[in-house]
């Protein structure tokens, strides 16, 4: 009270009340904790997973040497190659055959009319020339036109040659703007004809208007062909670690484009989009993990202390991942977090945390698939290796397993990608990655082993490692019990066997049940001879004491055990079992004795009960039942199988009816499984044996000696 009053004087009352309210409000504590963890992880990822931005421009020297932080498509080079491929594709045209047909038809008409005029002898020559002039599209001298009045065979020969020349050239196609070129080519061919210059001149004039475009550009087909050519060009990939620009080197347009593709140019709008995207991604991950915890690990979800421990392990692992990324993606020790989470909270929580850590590795390494796969599989292997711890060396063995899996994964990834060769650089890179992968496993286990005792002490959490150390027979308390209270020691060993087997049947913590049973009666060390199992001489000190005083002595051994446990720094979870292993049960022997003595004062039943509390966990309840069963069956004078079972069922039923199991999580089905486990073990110990007559016994001994 004085301490609280002093705090009120130092701290303003309003602030003091708020601090008290915060300490009492677990929901608020968890909310603040989740927000703090979210911000811490977000800041780490913003700093280390989002690449640094640079202020660069084309032609300006680079302020530093820049390497590609991840694999990226070189859009600039890719687009250039694709455009070059597209330009190599010729344009597509539609051919119009009517142009040739029209030209040949016009030539046929011209020469047919010319021959008809020539063959008409009734028309005089000047009139014939005038008629010929009308057939020709241009004005020409009559002396030149007179060349058409030669024999018809020559005219037909000229027609045939012109038809052949036009057909050949027109069929090759005449594109827009090529008409003059085609006319010159036709004139060149006509010049080689074996006719007079006048006839050749007439031919040139006649065909001149017939030359026109017969090929029309098809833009749709042309663009489709070019697009197909573009698609056939594979993207140019810049691999992670490739040098983009050296310090002092003028930045080219291609380099600047590549840096923009990598979002490495300062002042881009993509920066804000990246921050927002990372924020939303973390929100989704946190929501999924919280829902998962509330369903599969509610004990962690309900405890701010355990959530803080989990968050601290996560951040430590994340920082180790950031640090080791500078050496190799295969060295990222995700297995450290997986091992610690498994040891502290079990494999269910470790599975989801391992998956999230693997996703974080993907963000930190810029989406490197092999690093993510190594982190994920290494974490899963470590979880499997430490799920059932039997000794501290199991943690080291987990690191060995991770190293083996990482080595196999690295070899397989190199083989799959085809990067294995006998070249020095290839072998050097392969060896470096292999050493990093193997070192990952060793490093993970070493860090986990080193952090484990500090985290246990800091958060007052008892792990399987601590319980295994407490199960060592050389522990000072157990050795003292063996020397001072041997009956209690062997009773505790028997209770531990019963409790461990029963805990396995109901999926409780069997290791905790076994170790808790070892220490549940350590309070008897204060006055060992007041307990019947240690009265080897047969003298009972309770014979000289009143039932009330005897009850006080017997009933105090749970509290005495807690005090002794604190001196030897036993974990709180073991002290709870020591305090709860009798619950508020009745010390019936001295209660009945008090009734029989018919003392003056009225006998109050509540004065003959243990102070409790009742068992709060499955393990404490199982140890309560095992303790009672072991003592009860041992007291039977004729412990046959049927009597043993009746005794076990009777004692468990009395505990249930007395309400001693009301505050633990045991169901009626669990109680029946525990009962069956006790019956199986105790019946095996107290089974009936065949009685050998003395004569038969001696004969059996002699046969045994002869057999040797």
Image (cartoon, helix red, strand yellow):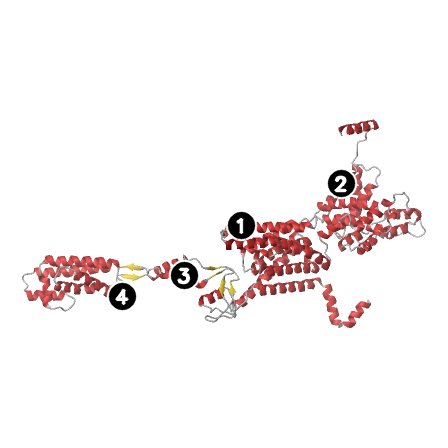
Could you tell me how far apart the alpha carbons at marks 1 and 4 are, in whole angstroms? 62 Å
Of labels 3 and 1, earlier in sequence is: 3
Q: Which of 685/266 is in front? A: 266
* Residue positioned 45% across, 71% down in the render: 59
The residue carrying mark 2 is 681
* Residue plotted at (73% across, 66% down): 21
Q: Secondary structure at mark 3?
A: helix
Q: Residue at x 63, y 57 (%)?
A: 291
Q: Nearer the viewer, mark 1 or mark 4?
A: 1
Sequence-wise first label, 2 or 1? 1
Q: Quadrant of the C terminus?
A: top right
Residue nearest the viewer, comparing 626 with 400: 400
Which of the image's four quarters has the N terminus? bottom right
Report the residue marked by disc 3.
Answer: 81
Q: CA distance from mark 3 to mark 2?
A: 80 Å
Which tag, 4 or 2, sits closer to the chain's start? 4
Residue marked by disc 1:
412
Residue holding disc 4: 177
Q: Which element carries disc 4, helix, strand or loop?
A: loop
- Report helix, strand or loop for mark 2: helix
Mark nearer the N terminus (3 vs 2): 3
**Mark before the other along the chain sequence, 1 or 4:** 4
Q: Position of residue 459 (x, y in %)?
A: 72, 59
Q: CA distance from mark 3 to mark 1?
A: 34 Å
Tell me what residue is drawn at x 6 percent, y 63 percent: 123
Q: For the residues marked 3 and 4, what is the alpha-carbon distance in whole angstroms?
A: 30 Å
Residue 603 at x, y = what percent?
Answer: 90, 51
- The quarter of the picture where residue 215 lies is bottom left
Say if mark 2 contacts mark 1, CB within 8 Å. Answer: no
């Amino acid at each position: 009270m004085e301490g609280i009053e002093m705090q009120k004087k130092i701290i303003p009352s309003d602030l003091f009340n708020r601090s008290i309210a915060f300490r009492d409000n677990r929901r608020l504590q968890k909310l603040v904790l989740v927000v703090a963890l979210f911000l811490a992880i977000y800041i780490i990822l913003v700093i280390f997973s989002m690449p640094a931005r640079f202020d660069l421009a084309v032609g300006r020297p680079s302020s530093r040497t820049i390497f590609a932080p991840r694999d990226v498509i070189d859009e600039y080079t890719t687009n250039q190659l694709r455009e070059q491929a597209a330009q190599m594709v010729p344009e597509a045209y539609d051919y119009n055959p009517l142009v040739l047909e029209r030209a040949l038809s016009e030539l046929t008409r011209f020469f047919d009319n010319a021959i008809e005029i020539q063959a008409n002898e009734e028309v005089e020559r000047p009139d014939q020339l005038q008629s010929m002039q009308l057939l020709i599209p241009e004005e020409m001298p009559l002396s030149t036109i007179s060349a058409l009045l030669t024999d018809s065979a020559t005219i037909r020969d000229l027609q045939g040659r012109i038809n052949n020349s036009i057909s050949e050239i027109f069929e090759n196609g005449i594109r827009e703007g090529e008409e003059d070129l085609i006319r010159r080519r036709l004139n060149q061919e006509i010049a080689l004809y074996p006719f007079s210059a006048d006839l050749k001149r007439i031919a040139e004039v006649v065909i001149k208007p017939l030359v026109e475009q017969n090929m029309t550009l098809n833009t749709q087909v042309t663009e489709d062909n070019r697009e197909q050519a573009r698609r056939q060009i594979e993207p140019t990939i810049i691999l992670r670690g490739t040098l983009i620009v050296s310090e002092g080197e003028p930045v080219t347009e291609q380099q600047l484009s590549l840096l923009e593709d990598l979002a490495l140019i300062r002042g881009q709008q993509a920066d804000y989009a990246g921050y927002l995207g990372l924020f939303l991604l973390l929100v989704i991950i946190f929501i999924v993990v919280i829902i998962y915890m509330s369903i599969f690990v509610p004990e962690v979800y309900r405890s701010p202390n355990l959530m803080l421990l989990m968050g601290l392990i996560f951040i430590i692992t994340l920082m180790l991942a950031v640090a080791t990324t500078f050496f190799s993606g295969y060295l990222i020790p995700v297995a450290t977090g997986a091992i610690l989470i498994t040891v502290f909270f079990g494999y269910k929580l470790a599975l989801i945390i391992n998956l999230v850590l693997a996703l974080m590795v993907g963000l930190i390494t810029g989406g490197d698939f092999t690093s993510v796969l190594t982190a994920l599989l290494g974490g899963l292997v470590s979880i499997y290796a430490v799920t059932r711890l039997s000794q501290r060396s199991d943690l080291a063995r987990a690191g060995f397993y991770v190293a083996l899996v990482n080595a196999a994964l690295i070899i397989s990834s190199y083989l799959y990608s085809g990067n294995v060769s006998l070249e020095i650089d290839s072998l050097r890179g392969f060896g470096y990655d292999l050493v990093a992968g193997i070192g990952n496993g060793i490093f993970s286990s070493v860090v986990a082993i080193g952090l484990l005792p500090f985290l246990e002490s800091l958060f007052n959490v008892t792990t399987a490692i601590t319980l295994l150390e407490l199960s060592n027979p050389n522990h000072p308390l157990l050795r003292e019990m063996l020397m001072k209270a041997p009956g209690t020691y062997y009773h505790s060993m028997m209770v531990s066997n019963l409790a461990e087997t029963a805990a396995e049947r109901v999926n409780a913590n069997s290791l905790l049940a076994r170790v808790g049973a070892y220490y549940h009666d350590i309070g008897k060390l204060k006055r060992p001879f007041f307990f019947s199992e240690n009265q080897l001489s047969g003298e009972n000190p309770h014979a000289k004491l009143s039932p009330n005083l005897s009850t006080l002595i017997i009933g105090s051994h749970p509290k005495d055990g807690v005090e002794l446990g604190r001196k030897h720094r036993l974990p709180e979870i073991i002290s709870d079992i020591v305090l709860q292993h009798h619950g508020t049960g009745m010390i019936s022997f001295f209660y009945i004795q008090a009734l029989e003595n018919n003392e003056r004062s009225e006998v109050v039943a509540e004065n003959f009960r243990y102070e409790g509390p009742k068992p709060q966990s499955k393990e404490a309840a199982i140890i309560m039942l095992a303790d009672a069963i072991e003592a009860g069956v041992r007291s039977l004078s004729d412990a046959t199988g049927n009597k043993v079972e009746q005794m076990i069922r009777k004692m468990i039923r009395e505990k249930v009816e007395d309400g001693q199991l009301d505050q633990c999580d045991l169901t009626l089905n669990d109680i029946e499984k525990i009962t069956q486990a006790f019956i199986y073990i105790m019946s095996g110990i107290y089974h009936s044996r065949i009685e050998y007559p003395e004569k038969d016994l001696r004969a059996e001994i002699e046969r045994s000696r002869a057999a040797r």
